[in-house]
Amino acid sequence: MTGASGGIGVPLARLLREAGAAVAVHDQLHDGDLGGDIDALCARLREDPPDILVNLAGYNQFARCEDQDVRGLVTVNLIAPARLIQAVLPGMKRRNSGHIVNIGSMAALIPMPHLGGYAAAKAGLKAFSDALRRELSGSGVRVVFVAPRAVDTGANRGLVAELNRRTGVRYDTPEQAARRIFQALCKGEKDVRIGWPERFFAAVNALMPALVDRGLAGHQRIGEKLLHKSETDQISGAGS
């Protein structure tokens, strides 16, 4: 399990242990940064594939497109999970059993202004999960993609927290998100989208994206104001 020390990861790991699972977690200090060289980690997973792989680690970045670390966002949120999946698949296939749990975001289904790199990476993880689930049909290896809405964790602090406050974004607690992920795993669900009205807006975005464009125009304006204020404050602080 990656991301086990994060806001959702702690309660999810606890739920898994309470259910009898022996949870091995990715430790950045010993196993390497998921944004860097993970060859050694992949090799260990290939030699001793787990029954369940949970790809939870990830991060977002609220910024204008030209200021985002697109390489880092895509590497951690998409490429690293894909490589870990490649490492465990041969062993899972030999056993004819296994479960891959990919944690995405509703941002993959409702891409928001100033979160383009994150939304793109999570949308890629969603597509990867769908394709993999269909590829593994009949193999005994199950794939589930879970898209939480905003969760009250460190990822939603600072400017993102202020944006969410001004636009009325609803939060789930880490425990609520963890319980839903755990439920999806236990039930063998395939595609889980957490939150209402987020599920409704995701469907609207798929069918009528121009309508969502208009609906999110206010988010864009508020986001620009917050970024401009942050830049102004930084300049003022540097000059004082």
Image (cartoon, helix red, strand yellow):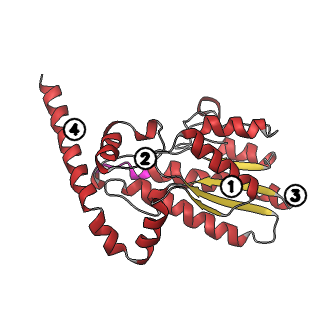
Q: Residue at x 60, y 52 (%)?
A: 81
Residue type indicated by callout 4: Ser
Q: Nearer the viewer, mark 3 or mark 2?
A: 2
**In the structure shown, which secondary structural element does the residue marked by tag 2 occupy?**
loop
Residue type indicated by callout 3: Arg
Q: Earlier in the sequence, mark 4 or mark 3?
A: 3
Name the foreground residue: 25 vs 218.
218
State the residue lying farthest toward the bottom: 207
Q: Earlier in the sequence, mark 2 or mark 1?
A: 2
Which secondary structure type mostly characterizes the magenta part of the structure? helix
Q: Which mark is residue 230?
A: 4
**In the structure shown, which secondary structural element does the residue marked by tag 1 occupy?**
helix
CA separation in Å, label 4 and label 3: 53 Å
How many C-alpha atoms fall within 10 Å of the one at disc 2: few (<14), some, or many (≥20)? many
Would you name the residue on which mark 3 appears? 95
Name the foreground residue: 18 vs 56.
18
Q: Residue at x 70, y 35 (%)?
A: 14
In magenta, the rendered stretch is 67-71
Q: Is residue 233 left or right of residue 158?
A: left
Q: Nearer the viewer, mark 4 or mark 3?
A: 4
The C terminus sits in image quarter: top left
Report if residue 158 is visible in the image.
Answer: yes
The reply to whether callout 4 and callout 3 are in contact (CB within 8 Å) is no
Q: Earlier in the sequence, mark 3 or mark 1?
A: 3
CA separation in Å, label 4 and label 2: 17 Å
Q: Is residue 31 left or right of residue 215?
A: right
Q: Is residue 224 left or right of residue 157?
A: left
The reply to whether callout 4 and callout 2 are in contact (CB within 8 Å) is no
The N terminus sits in image quarter: top right
